[in-house]
Image (cartoon, rainbow, N blue to C red):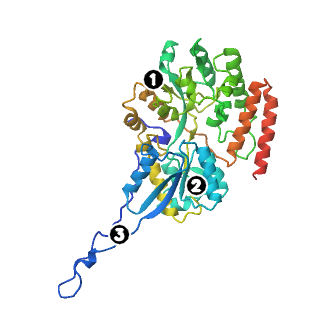
Amino acid sequence: MKKPALWVAGLLLTFSVTACSGSGNAPAASDKGTGADPTAATQTKTPEKEKIKFYTFKSNKPEEPTYQAVQAYNQSQDKVEVEYVSLVQNSDSTEFLKKLDVLIAGGEVVDAFMTGNEEELMERASRGVVEPLNSYFEAEGVKPEDEYFKVLKLDDKVYGLMPSATQWFTVFNKQQLDEAGLKLPEMGWTWDDFRDYAKKLTTPDHYGTYFHTWGEYANIIAYTEHPNPQLTPDLKPIFDDPSFKYFFGLRRAMEKEDKSVEPYADVLASNYHVLQQFFAGKASMLAVPSYAVRAGLNLEKFPHDFQMVYAPLPRSVDATDVGMTNISGGGLAVGAKSAHKQAAYDFIRWMTKESYKYTKEIPALKNVDGKALLEQFFSENKNLIDTDSLAKTLFDSRNKMPEGTFTVPYGSQLKTIVENSFASFMLDNRKFDDVKAEMTAEVEKVVAANK
């Protein structure tokens, strides 16, 4: 069998919750003549379920996969009952967390909750509203790094678990790729190659690629080949790294010289969804997180009829590790003031191991047969999803994250600094060194304020 990738290799470990029954194994009826009621021993009262609340930004609807997973957990055992509390109906994690923060500030006791990304979780962990999970794993006799490709940690404390893992890759419109006479690139292709592909894919009807406004798109290399996209391990700005000047210059050259990408000013003005131009056929390829796979089945939101084919993310021209990528995901966490922490921990552990059966997302677990999962998830959608190239991309054994990857609670502030600086570089035609100096100074201020 072909060796699967590091973050999805092997066989899924099943987490089973042992049901307890107060009426089972009743003692034998007393002998005749004792005067005892022969039915009394069997009239054991069923213990009341321990109740916990799970706060989520997923909708409270029967067709919502996360809702289905929670209901499945409730049916899987008889010790705990999870109340599904949806604070928004539009899946907006930012709006959800604003509401959750208000509730917590007002004294609401939260048992378990989810976040849209790890930075949101780390920010709340730094404020003391999240329970560290280390002792719970120790009691279970489990080292979390042995079971999960990535756990959400701050200062060596585990604060959250990812129910699914998102990996960056390159997705292509197969029809436009074929029309350009190009083959899918192999692992090891570079960002210079990416630029060349974009030029060859560009026609009067569509651009070769699309870059979004998020901070990741200012320098994707920083997210895939460095432990942190803005900081060194000793919390110094990393903007002297050659990848920043290279990627800023690449973006400008592709727009101004090659005309292979939609102008940044137009992207800002249009307020596109990150996937909109690709699925509209206006961009032939896209470097993007792997949630694009599932999104491609939402034909109501993204109508299209072409097949998606997949390749690894490009690497730096001088990179020695060709499989470097970025793995991320939302978090599941336990509230620090919960009176039911063990029950909440058991619940989020179950969600990391079982909810993928309902959400059809790749779990963050190691020991998963990823290729088999893709066949299970998408066997009826191969007209839209090429599962062979997807499996080859996601589950290549060379895939890995940078050594020493770390997150800081103020990461969203640092990302905003880079976004604003890149916008100034592109819109005002500024020199990179001038923008770099400003980014460096702004990041240093944020770091100093958080020491």
Residue 158: mark: 2
Give the total number of marks visible in the rendering: 3
User: What amino acid type is highlighted by mark number 3?
Assistant: Thr
Mark 2, Cα crowd under 10 Å, few <14 / some 14-19 / many 20+, is many
Query: How far separated are the C-alphas under marks 3 and 2?
Result: 35 Å
Q: Which residue is mark 3?
A: 46
First along the sequence among labels 1 and 2: 2
- Asked whether the viewer can see residue 323, the reply is yes
The residue sitting at 79% across, 44% down in the picture is 444
First along the sequence among labels 3 and 1: 3
- Label 3 sits on a secondary structure element that is loop
- Label 2 sits on a secondary structure element that is strand
- Residue 421: x, y in percent? 75, 33
Verify CB contact (< 8 Å) between mark 1 and mark 2. no
- Residue 353: x, y in percent? 44, 49
The residue sitting at 47% across, 58% down in the picture is 346
Residue 422 in the image: above or below residue 34: above
The residue lying toward the viewer, choosing from 425 and 226, is 425
Residue 307: mark: 1
User: What amino acid type is highlighted by mark number 2?
Assistant: Val
Residue 198 in the image: above or below residue 28: above
Mark 1, Cα crowd under 10 Å, few <14 / some 14-19 / many 20+, is some
User: In the rendered view, does 434 fall on the left or right side of 343?
Assistant: right
The residue lying toward the viewer, choosing from 85 and 149, is 85
Residue 346 in the image: above or below residue 38: above
Mark 3, Cα crowd under 10 Å, few <14 / some 14-19 / many 20+, is few
Of the residues tagged 3 and 2, which is closer to the observer? 3
